[in-house]
Amino acid sequence: MPDSAAGLPGFRNPTLPLRERVDDLLNRLTIDERLAMLHQYSPAVPRLGVGAFRTGSEGLHGVSWLGEATVFPQAVGLGASWDEELVREVGEAVSTELRAFHYHRPTAVGSDRGPNSLQAWAPVLNLLRDPRWGRNEEGYSEDPVHTARVGEAYCRGLSGDHPTYLRAAPVLKHFLAYNNEDDRCTTSSALRPRVLQEYDLAAFRPVVASGAATGAMAAYNLVNGRPCHVSPLIEAELRRWARPTGHELFVVSDAEAPSNLVDPEHYFDDHAESHAAALKAGIDSFTDHGEDTETVIGRLREALERGLIDEADVDRAIRRQLEVRFRVGEFDPELDPYAGTGPEVIDSPEHRALARRAATESAVLLKNEGLLPIDPARTARIAVIGPLADTLYEDWYSGTMPYQVSVAVGLAAALGAHGGEVVHVEGSDRITLRSRTTGELLGKSAFDVTDWGGGACTLRAADTGCYLSLQDDDTLAPGQDVIKSWFVKETFLIEPAGPDTVVLRNVFTGRYATVDPTDGRVGVTAGTAQEAEHWQREVVRDGAAEAREAAATADVAVVVLGNHPMVNGRETEDRADIALPEGQEKLLRAVAAVRPDTALVVMSSYPYALDWADEHLPAVVWTSHGGQETGHALAAVLLGEAEPAGRLAQTWYRGDDPLPAPLDYDVIKAGWTYQYHRSTPLYPFGHGLSYTDFAHRDLRLSQPAIDPDGSVELAVTLENTGARPGSEVVQVYVRALEARYEAPHLRLADFRKVRLEPGESRELAFRLPAERLAHWSVATGEFTVDPGGYEVIVARSADHAVLTAPLTVTGEPAGPRAGTGHRILAVDFDDYEGAAIVDATRADGDAVTPADPARPATLHFREVDLAGAAAIEVETAREGDGEGDGESGARLEVRADGRVLAEIDVPVTGDRYAWTSTTAELTAALQGVHDLSLTLHGDFRLTAFRLGAAG
């Protein structure tokens, strides 16, 4: 352990290489001190002058949970900007404010939690496969190329550009294939190799390989039957991509996920075993049991004592933690260029301006038949109507907005400058609920009712503005004026119970409101509607009538609808469908009936099916929940002071389009996203209109053909042919022609956002490496660029191609799959029916089993060379049920070109992880290339097979 010339320990010497400093400090720590560092809240080591440390501050679109801070648009909104430089600037602002919180807003006196962390748990790279995902707002896009580009930009903004020190340390979330909230801790995402490599890993791979990320967070779910927190992909993929950058990733667990490995997942028998497995799989920090460090460290200490882990496993994890701590300047405050960040940066004028620009750039004009932009000089009055017209909402990962500019306020300010006025009405019914038992009004107030979908509504007291809420003692009373808590207790179902009466059901508990006849106490205790209090419902204000009156007296109506980010779709809760809430749809139709010049503004965390609006309204605009400057941004877009520069980064489906099952993660077979969906969407990926016109011309490729390792330069000219300045996103897609595999309809290869003045043109150059044409070959286990014909497409969206050029990849066609003498993994099928992918062991490998044991599953392997094959050896595992489960209880059937070659009785091995090999001779010795299929009958697992000679 070297000391510096000044007598300081080596780890304090900034002239030493980082690795030497890390090793020096690590070697000074005792095993107990190292074990303690494995918890999220790492205690201080006073004898070495090392302070307390904790992993993780939330910074998805602003600093979260620490107080007032600049709130930028949700990630899904930032993704819709398609503007990497803008997103980088937002990341820079977020990490600058995070630095200020770190230095100037310390934790409570006496707390050993450590200062607010400079490790930012952002961005989220999970792809937006299913628009019903409750956390849709947290991702950027349904496309891996787009997500990776935007995610890398955000990482670079967070980390800064200093060669030695990080402003903040970005952590990518959530690894891997996490797109459902319902039962998220026990559901498994089935990823066949092509989906794994071409889709889910493809969003993470470029960001990690670029060196922009410093860490990753494992996801709650399982992948192919194995919890992500013990996934071999952490080491085999994530860390393999990172090592060429010179830094390893610091991988953290999600909250309570290590404990989930035992309960509710039941994947391991005890916590010492599960924590050991997670550590060995690559989890470096355990976010578990809150600030209760000893429970988690006790489990790891037990694992060490039992020989389940050794000190080298601990040291690997601590070394990764220490590297991040050195890189954020913890041990060199005098050299850290970001150490002087003061509190004045929080919600600074510069950050307010950036928040406004980000909200403006992410607004998407979905439809426009000339209503927009509204001419303020010719518009005396605008009616702004709807539940989101005059309020802004925070999502779970939002910071606390320092101020709010709603759509109504923003439009009033902008239109008022031209002498016009804005009239605002919410359009909600105001009702009273009078007890039939006591005659008293519930809450002694009238309530404004807002429908958030699925029958769930909020009741906001007319006199105080507070929401009716279930209290801790199970009583009902108006409580908070903001809904933002892990358990939302402010939503209700108002169910009819008879003539003019209703019952009130709390969504959180599912129980009904009751009234104690002795003291009038209102509780939520009834289990059935029959036991519930009957309330006389009286409408004291007809919201639709009020909205119609406001619209009838205005020149233009702007109806602002959407979601509350804490209700229905949110973390822990997926949406049931993509329909607009029924009450909101009725309000929209009522307004449009009296004011044809109605623009719909959808402010939401996710897509909706807007079929009626698209057919009947002249203008539709979408924005995410855009943060504190939403109103100014939307006013600028609606009145034409700014261009609608956003483009959808997610497909918006039609209402009658049957979406795949939420747990069907096979984007290829299920038909998810613009790449594979088989029906025409309402609004396609990449869609967004402008107030000006653009012409694309002169698409040129530098050469007509390339080899599988080559690249081609392409150029295209973009011209603004309209009368206004504007922005266009030039999207470059590729398509394989006559592919031997199920190829995407088209696939995004590159994009660029360009702003042009009227009449201005610009030639844009793109480099297209052949790897953008690659697919994952299940026959060879690697990315492959097939020779043959391709198209390069310049488009305005995935459904709006404007220019196309042919491209040929030269080379020899791929041969058949090597069959005889080769071990073929069952999961490397070309196609399948009725199969599920599961874990081969707790540590590694995949297997295939029937999704329903009562129905067979078939795996198809195309173009297999069977020359010399006379026998087949299969690797199977079968638990057995212990009752009459003999040798013939399950069987495997092998066919070539439909002809039965073998039928194999699958033996019982007694355990799903106990594997055995069984060999059977083929009924015919086939030569040449054939399509092979394996059909699994019964409850067993197949991990691999091998074709060979007989005997």
Image (cartoon, helix red, strand yellow):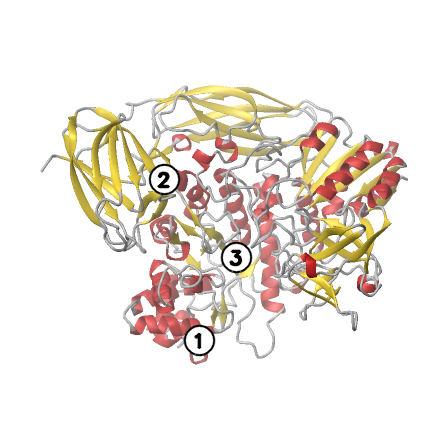
Name the quadrant of the C terminus.
top left
Q: Position of residue 462 (x, y in %)?
A: 83, 57
Report crowding for label 1: few under 14, some 14 to 19, many 20 or more residues within 10 A (C-alpha): few
In this view, 942 is above or below 700: below
Q: To which residue does mark 2 refer?
A: 855
Give me the C-alpha separation between circle 1 and circle 3: 24 Å
Q: Amino acid at mark 2?
A: Arg
The secondary element bearing badge 3 is classed as: strand
Q: Amino acid at mark 1?
A: Glu
Q: To which residue does mark 3 refer?
A: 121
First-in-chain label (2 vs 3): 3
Q: Position of residue 144 (x, y in %)?
A: 48, 40
Q: Nearer the viewer, residue 914 or 827?
A: 914
- Say whether residue 637 is visible: no
The secondary element bearing badge 1 is classed as: helix
Q: Position of residue 747 (x, y in %)?
A: 48, 31
Most distant residue in the left direction: 951
Please tell me in which quadrant of the rendered image residue 558 appears.
top right
First-in-chain label (1 vs 3): 3
Give me the C-alpha separation between circle 2 and circle 1: 48 Å
Q: To which residue does mark 1 refer?
A: 294
